[in-house]
Amino acid sequence: HRDFLDPFCNEYVLIGEEETSLGINYLQFEEEIRTFEIRDSDIIVASYPKAGTTWTQELVWLIGNDLDFKAAEEHLDKRFPHFELCTIVNFAKMTEMLGSTRPEYIGNSINYLRDLEGTRFIKTHLTYNLLPEQILNGNRKPKIIYVMRDPKDVCVSYYHHGRLIQGWRADFQNFSKVFLSEKIMFGSYWKHVLGYWEHRDKPNVLILTYEEMKKDLLSVIRKTAQFLDKKLNENKIPQLLKHLSFESMKNNRAVNQQDKIESRMKHKLVPEQGAFMRSGTSQNYKGEMSEELILKFDEWTKKSISGSSFVTEPIA
Ligand code: A3P
């Protein structure tokens, strides 16, 4: 088997036995994504997978909805649908395997978003250049919040995610090789980051890092509220900080993806047991990467960002 899929190269796919691989259909939806009608009121959280997307989504959603904790009990996937999700997984095959049907916000994410009224909260892992045309040509200016993270931690987190949810079966050594070779789902980490970084000075773009969220979540909350033109209810800030803590999110079924993990485990589709909210720390890679691999990553980063405007490392 070919081990991974890079949807942008349309190479193929996944790790594991034939029956567990869920094909990727990006090209099938390319036109729909390109021509998707964006609204200026849309709020988009964009990221490379495992950079802290879910955490950022929950933060942005709560600020955007005036800290309505009750409404946040609804599943995050429904409140904050993943735009191109329908391109990533072959849901017909998945439904057949899992014996259940998928709600539209998962199986037909583009249609679902098209029909939503009011402020739409949209998650995407697409690279900047693959966002809908109306964003690229500046005709629409939705708010875009991009979150990034040290790629060494992203790689480790991606590896576990792949085994836990996607059914990938590679060991870490092989996985990190593929990650560095950039032939992986959502492609090159640094191309992804730099694609958004170039737009960081636009008033509708905010770049956050996982590391600053870990160091000073309150500042990130305030910065994000200002960016979204939202006034925070100061009395509710302690509750917000608690809600966004790793421990709370780990135990919150609306955001912790436990439903997906349980269904994969029940059907023995994945080789790993564990939690989506796994370590929740910075520099977790130190426990999983050899010195040699760390050096390799740092060299790759240096090479990848050289010549770009990304001169400082906000992820340090
Ligand atoms: P780890 O696997 O390193 O623990 P994404 O949402 O982009 O898939 O990112 C998932 C990563 O964010 C996981 O990293 C997860 O544990 C971490 N994460 C999610 N919520 C968090 C929180 N409240 N605090 C710290 N880390 C969090």
Image (cartoon, grey):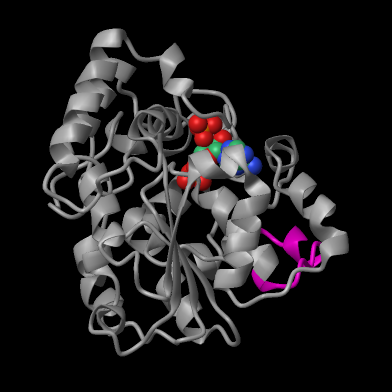
Q: Is residue 313 above or below residue 58?
A: above
Towards the viewer: 73 or 153? 153
Residue plotted at (36% across, 36% down): 20
Task: Report the predominant secondary structure element of the magenta stretch.
Answer: loop
Q: Quadrant of residue 2?
A: top left
Residue plotted at (81% across, 68% down): 233
Residue 198 relative to residue 259: left or right: left
Indicate whether residue 181 is drawn in magenta. Answer: no
> Where the N terminus falls, by quadrant?
top left
Residue 171: % across, % down? 32, 17
Residue 96 relative to residue 231: left or right: left
Residue plotted at (78% across, 45% down): 242
Name of the residue lying farthest toward the bottom: 139
Residue 24: % across, % down? 27, 53
Residue 223: % across, % down? 58, 62
Q: Which residues are magenta?
A: 64-75
> Where the C terminus falls, by quadrant?
top left
Q: Is residue 125 above or below residue 187?
A: below
Name of the residue lying farthest toward the top: 291
Indicate whether residue 67 is drawn in magenta. Answer: yes
Q: Tell me if I can see residue 222 in this picture.
A: yes
Name of the residue lying farthest toward the right: 235
Residue plotted at (58% across, 32% down): 280
